Amino acid sequence: MTQQPITSLLVANRGEIAVRIFRTARALGLATVAVHSDPDADALHVREADAAVRLPGAAPADTYLRGDLVIGAALAAGADAVHPGYGFLSENADFAREVVAAGLTWIGPPPEAIEAMASKTRAKELMRAAGVPLLDPVDPATATTADLPLLLKAAAGGGGRGMRVVRDLDTLKESLDAASAEAASAFGDGEVFAEPYVERGRHVEVQVLADSHGTVWALGTRDCSLQRRHQKVIEEAPAPALPEPLRTTLHEAAVAAARAVSYQGAGTVEFLVTADGRPYFLEMNTRLQVEHPVTEAVFGLDLVALQLRAAEGAALPLTPPEPSGHAVEARLYAEDPAQDWRPQTGVLHTLAVPGEVRVDTGFADGDTVGVHYDPMLAKVIAHAPTRAEAVRALAHALAGARVHGLTTNRELLVRSLRHPEFTEARIDTGFYERHLGALTEPAPDAVARTALAALAAALAEAAPEPGAPLARRLGGWRNVRSAPQTRRYTVAGAEHEVRYHPVDHPGVRVLSVERHLVALEVDGVRRLFHVKHNSNKPEVYVDSPFTGAHTLTPVPRFADPQDRTEPGSLLAPMPGTVVRVAEGLAPGDAVTAGQPLLWLEAMKMEHRIVSPASGTLTALHATLGHQVEFGALLAVVQEESPA
């Protein structure tokens, strides 16, 4: 059936995916409309759209999850189509129906297909009828030790929310309650089901694309096994080291899944592949995936353009193009992997990735990363004729990237891509459980690297700026001209002192010094250090292929005294919202070391705040729904006196 051609497209989303969809829309000659919450008023996706409509408020529930406001925005701006991106309302069948009822074109599968796959429990029933291989469900009420380990999963939604691995029956009820509460908070549906947890399994998925004329494409496989908290970190296409018969099975099962629900548009069928090569259906995502660029690179396609054409009623060719080469994608997050993946907020001063790689991002230099949304800064994608070349190119680009202002997982990504298990394609979902400690520990020569970075920072800081006053260019006034010139910096909480005139580093010779570039000869080899000074804050950023990236804070000569908090104070480790408080918790209660007291939600992830010691809760300042800033006092625990 021929649809009306699209002329103006509203993207019911934000950040990176909105920017990416707008890029294709512009190439197709479509007008673009953005929606935004108050914190996103000056976001990159808003700046890049032809028009934008405000959704009053900050929380997703008040803005991007308000289908009525989004549809109203589309009508007000004159858009005739709505693309949901991923997340938020992208898999909401009711929203899809309301878009169509408003006379707008829905860029996605039919609402009935979304509804059929929205509940993982119902989707599994449909897949069983279609002959797609499945794991047998486990009833938590009758589970025994023989059923362990178990994986608890939210029936609605995804992205790792509402998921728990249970290895001990004694923790099953607590895990069920926690998974259900998280699912209800994230998706408005607390239904949780259980199935066997497959140790060292691989997460392999198949991209499908279907038109309204009966053609369904299976666009190869993707491996998304490297995950943290059940959320993907590194993805690649095609999935490596799969026997050809298994690839065929996965393709056929994905096509059968799409046909079972009369699918149209882009979608992804996800499978768990066991160590001995048996595939099991996990779920179908009825939307575009975050990792779609690796499939685009391998097949030479624009999946967003194909989504738009399918929505207009165009027919696909009977067969897809042939794949070529290998592509790998890494998700660059503002988070600290060494601190339980703690999300970071603040100003992103610089984001620059060198090399022949694709960078999809929703941020530009100077943008602020807030607390309300996912902390992903960018996706970096490399494509090459072979897997080894693609992996090497991506690792090299990330190693040379300059990311200033926030702690990120950049170093973890580089080390992961260069880890023998990854380079040899011996990957599974337990990768970070086994290797996170080693991947986040400081390098053996970390102190020496930091010393060189501090030297470069001190030299660059002492270099005159063009047009500086004469006194500055002559080095300023000093009472003792022969005294060594030193500078102190703090790096990752540790203090470093460097003598930069004369240079006191064995084997190091200064070759040239500019305000933003320092060349040193280190043990006979010329090394370059790029230095960036933050105009608004004291931090200095030093990037070098030799030493890596460093953020240095100059130590003032006379440090201001800092207030001390009361012993036993629990401070917010990040800005967030209090989403749970331990049942019945009140000042005066006895608590034990490690006991969860409350839960903070920040950037779509929950973080437990536990008692640091056994003792008495003497103060509780956090209440349900309370938004707190970084460092805010949440509670105070008075440690019990030793006997």
Image (spheres, rainbow, N blue to C red):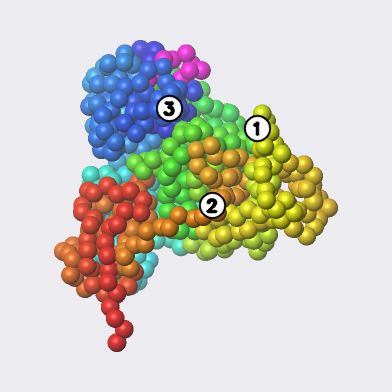
Q: Is residue 26 magenta?
A: yes
Where disc 2 sits, the SS reads loop
| Magenta-tinted stretch | 25-33
N-terminal label among 3 and 2? 3
Residue 22 to residue 147: above or below: above
N-terminal label among 1 and 2? 1
Q: Residue 595 in the image: x percent, y percent?
A: 29, 69
Q: Is residue 17 magenta?
A: no
Around disc 3, counting alpha carbons within 10 Å, would you say few (fewer than 14), some (14 to 19), or many (20 or more)?
many
- From the viewer's side, name the closer residue of 220 and 353: 353
N-terminal label among 3 and 1? 3
- The three-letter amino acid code for the residue at tag 3 is His
Check contact, mark 3 vs mark 2: CB within 8 A.
no
Tell me if I can see residue 310 in this picture: no
- Residue where numbered disc 1 is placed: 469
Q: Residue 453 in the image: x percent, y percent?
A: 66, 51
Q: Residue 379 in the image: x percent, y percent?
A: 52, 39
